């Protein structure tokens, strides 16, 4: 099993969710986050005053899938979340050693 963590632009969430559902992803965790990378924040003007935004809002997706689906999930997120502008995000893939469904006690791939 693989844990795929992706940080994407917030307005891309619905499009990415629909694309992942189409390829067979049955669930994901979503959180609003803030961060910075190459973008290093930016400045905005609010009521005539300029101020620095050091952390950029993003959406964090966490998806656990069988090994056989991992490459397709990464490629789907990459192509769907892409805007060709700085700050499109990052995708990380980690190994998952064990998973348990709380309600039934099913484990590993059966728990997904």
Image (spheres, grey):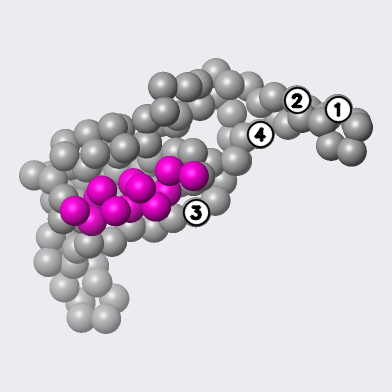
Q: Earlier in the sequence, mark 3 or mark 1?
A: 3
**Res. 43 image quadrant:** top right
Residue 78 numbered mark, or none: none
**Distance from Cα at disc 3 to Cα at disc 1:** 28 Å
Residue 55 numbered mark, or none: 4
Q: Earlier in the sequence, mark 3 or mark 4?
A: 3
In the picture, measured across the screen, residue 107 lies left or right of residue 56, that is left
Residue at (55%, 18%) from the top-left corner?
Answer: 38
Residue 50 numbered mark, or none: 1
Residue at image mark 3: 31
Q: Main secondary structure of the magenta part?
A: helix
User: What secondary structure is marked by label 4?
Assistant: loop
The quadrant of the rendering that contains the C terminus is bottom left
| Residue placed furthest toward the right | 48
Q: Nearer the viewer, residue 55 or 1?
A: 55
User: What secondary structure is marked by label 3?
Assistant: strand
The picture places residue 31, in percent across and down from the top left corner, at 50, 54
- Of badges 2 and 3, the one in the foreground is 2
Residue at (29%, 76%) from the top-left corner?
Answer: 102
- Of badges 3 and 1, the one in the foreground is 1
Q: Residues within 10 Å of mark 3 (few under 14, many from 20)?
A: few
**Distance from Cα at disc 2 to Cα at disc 3:** 24 Å
Q: Earlier in the sequence, mark 2 or mark 1?
A: 2
**Distance from Cα at disc 3 to Cα at disc 4:** 15 Å
- Of badges 1 and 4, the one in the foreground is 1
What stretch of residues is rendered in magenta?
Answer: 11-22
């Amino acid at each position: 099993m693989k844990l795929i963590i992706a940080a994407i632009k917030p307005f891309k969430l619905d499009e990415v969710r629909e694309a992942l559902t189409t390829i067979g992803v049955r669930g994901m965790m979503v959180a609003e986050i803030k961060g910075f990378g190459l973008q290093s924040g930016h400045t905005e003007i609010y009521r005539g005053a300029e101020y620095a935004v050091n952390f950029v809002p993003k959406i964090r997706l966490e998806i656990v899938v069988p090994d056989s689906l991992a490459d397709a999930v990464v490629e789907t997120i990459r192509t769907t979340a892409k805007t060709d502008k700085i700050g499109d995000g990052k995708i990380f893939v980690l190994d998952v050693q064990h998973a348990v469904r709380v309600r039934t006690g099913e484990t590993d791939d059966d728990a997904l």
